Amino acid sequence: MINYILNAGDHDGFRALEWKQLLLPGPVTLHPDVQLSQALPMINHRGTEFRELMRQVISKLRKIYGCDCDIALLTASGTGAIEAMLINFLAPNEKLLVVQTGVFSDRMAKIAKTLGMEVELIEPKEGEGITPEELDSVMKRVKPDAVGVVANETSTGVAHKNLEELAKVVHSNDAIILVDAVSYLGGHELHMDSMDLDAVASATQKALMSPPGLSFVAYRERAAQRLQEVPRRSVYWDFLSYKKFYDEKHETPATPAVSTMFALNKALDIILEIGLSNWINRHRAFAEALNFAIERSGGKVYPHPNWRSNTIVVPYVPEGMTPAMVKNLAKEKWGLEIGSGGWKIKEKTVRIGTMGWYGRNVVYRAIRMIVDIYGGEKSVAEEAFDYYLSLL
Ligand SMILES: Cc1ncc(COP(=O)(O)O)c(C=O)c1O
């Protein structure tokens, strides 16, 4: 509906009826039922219907997080969840070691500095994440209280699929691991309990296929212990208060974004009905098929093959084209809205999200678009689509 409205001024009457598919690094195209859920009548956030909604959302999120643990549900975008995670689990003057992979690790470092924490950076090799060995040797030297990892660096498409190994190293060095999973949760395998992750932040508008506006931090024993010890420095972000409200009443301390919660609740139903592992795999298959089509058409992708994201594909634009030209072509010719590049590769790359609601026709269209842009043989598109189907 919104795209009809936004295009209503176009001169070409047919274009006015086109639905633009978002293949952005977020936000994403929603399942129609998720979209419509936002229009449900408002309810009292201190009433019985709300308490049931909250109970359902938290119990479904626990399944997605793979944890039997506390989850603070925040009315804020992902950045709010990262700030809340840091302020609750680290005291001023404590040391955070951040794995520097792109824009969002830089943001985590900036938040920590602003909150008075000491920040050290560890930069992996180009297009890669950090290995347990590299992390161990830096931790021995730096002796941080916590390590911050952006599980899937949305600005570069570099994903850490070794969180469990990293957590072991972090714990053997007497620290906690704080994970930014904003574009990872729902798109990659993550099971907090079995991976022994201490705190994981995420948000609605990426692989959980919901509108922007809510974010969450799930945390386990080591982090919960810190919650008791770290001085309270914020009212809005105080997880002790979120916990008290949830445990006693299934409510939040302040007025939450109720309509976004309706949508999230519906999206989680759809994801759990499809099956979480199928849902994750759908992202992986789309991303792998796109990477295949890019490389077979003579293009290059930024992340090293071992570190590629399921949710964001980051190709270099072809010689003679700018990211703006590629984005424009994607939108005008193929009806696909893709994202600009980010971080130090901003001027050379675009970002294609594989998140949100789409059918096979969109996957096929995206593959055709890639082959068109990189000047590949038409048969590559057929091969890439067959490859996609074989991965489902
Ligand atoms: C990995 C990651 N972390 C943090 C954020 C910040 O989230 P938001 O824009 O919702 O504040 C984003 C947003 O794209 C992200 O991708």
Image (tube, rainbow, N blue to C red):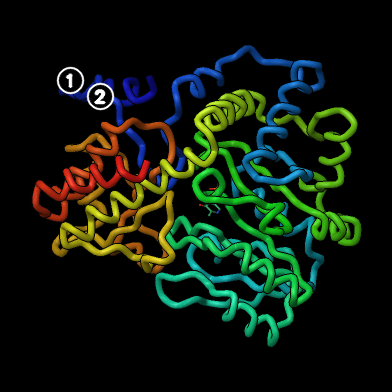
Q: Position of residue 11 (x, y in %)?
A: 17, 23
Is residue 383 placed above or below 363 in the rendered structure?
below
Q: Position of residue 381 (x, y in %)?
A: 17, 46
**Residue lying at the far bottom of the rendered structure:** 141
Is residue 300 placed above or below 180 in the rendered structure?
below
Q: Are marks 2 and 1 in contact (CB under 8 Å)?
A: yes
Residue at image coords 16%, 57%: 297
Q: Position of residue 278 (x, y in %)?
A: 47, 38
Quadrant for residue 262, please give it.
Answer: top right
Q: Is 232 in front, or is 264?
A: 264
Label drawn at residue 18 = 2
Amino acid marked by disc 2: Glu
Q: Quadrant of the N terminus?
A: top left
Amino acid marked by disc 1: Phe
Whether residue 254 sits left or right of residue 352 in the image: it is: right
- Badge 1 density bin: few <14, some 14–19, many ≥20, Cα 10 Å: few
Q: Rounded to the nearest whole Å, what is the CA distance between mark 2 and mark 1?
A: 7 Å
Q: Is residue 113 visible?
A: no
Pointer 1: what residue? 14
Is residue 193 placed above or below 121 in the rendered structure?
above
Whether residue 267 sits left or right of residue 117 in the image: it is: left
